[in-house]
Amino acid sequence: MQFSHLFYILLSYFLGAIPFGLLLSRSQGINIREQGSKNIGATNVSRLLGKKLGVVTFLLDCAKGYVPMLLAGLIFADSPNHQLLIALCGAAAVIGHMFPVYLGFKGGKGVATGLGVFLYLAPQAVLLSIIVFIAIVAATGFVSLGSLLGSAVVLPCVYFLDEPTWKLILAGFIVIMIWMKHHENIGRLLQGTEKSFKKRS
C-alpha cells in the first residue's frame, strides 16, 4: 500500500472525527456533551436544539461516511487495491466519529456515519434500513432500538444483493461497532429504562 493510500485513510479518520453536532450546538450557546444524553449525535441535537439542527447534524455525519469512500473510489480507481482502500476509508471515518481525537476519543455511536458508508455500499439496503428504523421508532418511540435493528438489516440485504465480499465484511464491521457503542442503550432497553419519545410526549 502506497503512502498516498495511508495518508487518505488517515484523512478519512480526521474527517470522521469532526464533531458536527458539538460545533452546531456551540454555535447556539449549548454544549451537548454536558446536556441530554451527552452524545454528540443527531438525536441529542434534536432533543436539545430542535429537529432542523438535528437533521443538519445527521446529514453532515452521514456525509462523513459517504464522501471519503466516494472520493477514494474516484481518485484511486486505477489502483490494484482500490476496493481495500475504499473499505478502509469507510471504516476509518466511522472509527473517527466514534473515537474522535479532537474529543479525547469519546465520540458518537456511528449510526449516521455508518449509514453514509452503507449508502455507498448498497443504496437498496439503506432504503430498507430507513424503513425499519422509522417503523420501529414510530411503534416504540425508541430511537436506539430503531438504530440497532435498522443497522442490523443491512447485513442480510448486502448478502442477498450478492454484493462483493469486501462490502459484506465492511458492513459487518460497521454493524458490530454500532451495536458495541449502543451497549448502554441495550442494557436500558432490557431493563425497561430507555428513554422513549412516546413516553416523553
Image (cartoon, rainbow, N blue to C red):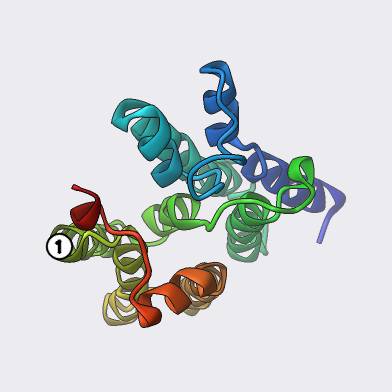
Q: Residue at x 30, y 56 (%)?
A: 123
Please tell me in which quadrant of the rendered image residue 131 appears: bottom left
Residue 158, picture quadrant: bottom left
Q: Where does the image place residue 194, in percent across and percent down from the top left?
A: 37, 66
Q: Amino acid at mark 1?
A: Ala
Any part of residue 154 in sight? yes
Where is residue 56 shown, x and y percent of the image?
A: 39, 30
Q: Name the residue: 33% across, 76% down.
A: 192
Relative to 50, 1 lies left or right:
right
Q: Position of residue 8 (x, y in %)?
A: 73, 45
Q: Residue at x 55, y 25 (%)?
A: 30
Number of numbered callouts drawn: 1
Foreground residue among 185 and 97: 185
Q: Is 149 rendered above or below residue 42?
A: below
In the image, 143 versus 171, the foreground residue is 143
Depth check: give the residue in front, 66 or 134: 134
Image coords of residue 54 (percent x, y): 38, 34
Crowding at label 1, few (<14), some or many (≥20) Cα neighbours within 10 Å? Answer: some
Vertical position of residue 184 compared to residue 120: above or below? below
Q: Is residue 170 visible?
A: no
- 162 left or right of 63? left
| Tag 1 secondary structure | helix
Q: Tell me the residue that label 1 is attached to.
A: 135
Foreground: 121 or 29?
A: 29
- Identify the residue shown where x is 47% and y is 71%: 171
Give left or right: position of 17 versus 73. Answer: right
Screen quadrant of the N terminus = bottom right
